[in-house]
Every structure is written in structure tokens, then in C-alpha cells.
Amino acid sequence: MRRILSSVMTSLFLLPLLSLPTPAAAYFDDLCKTEIDAEITRLAIPPERIERTYTVNVYNGNGQTGGGRIDRIEGWVVFKDCKGNLVIKVDRVCRPLGNYTTYECQVPGVRNY
């Protein structure tokens, strides 16, 4: 009886924790967002031109099963006025690696592919 009661109490205590996002997951969702937003500002892209932005964590692919370590982060800017994107690359500690645009989108001073 004591064992069952202990098990039930433990379950009741842990159950609410399952519905909360893990701190690590929340941390990795917007890694380097501040630095990526600063680069968008530095490039003088008018806010009305931007439809949305998001970040993508790119993992190290070394080894047989791939990597579990973030190699770099890419900030993607989706524009309202052209087909394509601006990609802002930073390393895993948020230092700039470079920028490029895709397809029809142009940003002054940024290479297009």
C-alpha cells in the first residue's frame, strides 16, 4: 500500500512538469536571434518589406549517425516584395559567418545566389 501511494504521489507531482517546455528546448528555439535581428537592422531592411523571420539550427554532420552539436545558426528573412530569402549565418556562439540572398531577392551589399 505504501509503495502504491508513493508511486501515485510521485506521478501527481511529475505530471504537470510534462506539459511545460523544457528549458533547453526553449533556449535552442531562438538561439542568436538578437544578433540576427541586429544584422537585419545593420543591413537597413525596412520592416514593411519583411513578411516574417525564423531561425534554423544546423547540426554538425560528422560521424556515422550525424552530429548532435549545433554547428551554426541561420536566420531566414522572408520578404513580401520578392520571391526568395535573405539568409544570415552565425556560428554556434553567434559570431557572423556571412549573408546571402536567394532567387529574386536583393539586399544592397549582400551576395545573391
Image (spheres, rainbow, N blue to C red):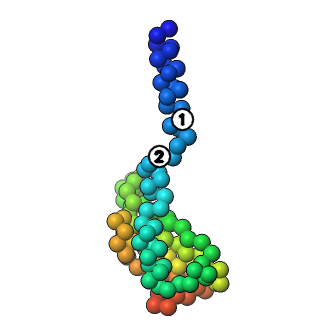
Residue 110 in view in this figure: yes
Looking at numbered disc 2 in the image, what kind of residue is underneath it?
Answer: Thr
Name which residue lies at 48% across and 24% down.
10
Residue to which mark 1 is pinned: 16
* Mark 2 or 1, nearer chain start: 1
Which residue has dot 2 on it?
22
What SS does tag 1 mark? helix
Secondary structure, mark 2, is loop
Marks 2 and 1, Cα distance to the nearest angstrom? 12 Å
Q: In the image, residue 23 lies at what x, y percent?
A: 44, 48
Q: Is residue 37 above or below residue 81?
A: above
Q: Residue 30 versus residue 59: which sits nearer the camera?
A: 30
Q: Position of residue 9 (x, y in %)?
A: 50, 21
**Residue farthest to the top?**
1
> Which quadrant holds residue 96?
bottom left
Q: Amino acid at mark 1?
A: Pro
Question: Looking at the image, which residue is at 65% across and 80% down?
Answer: 80
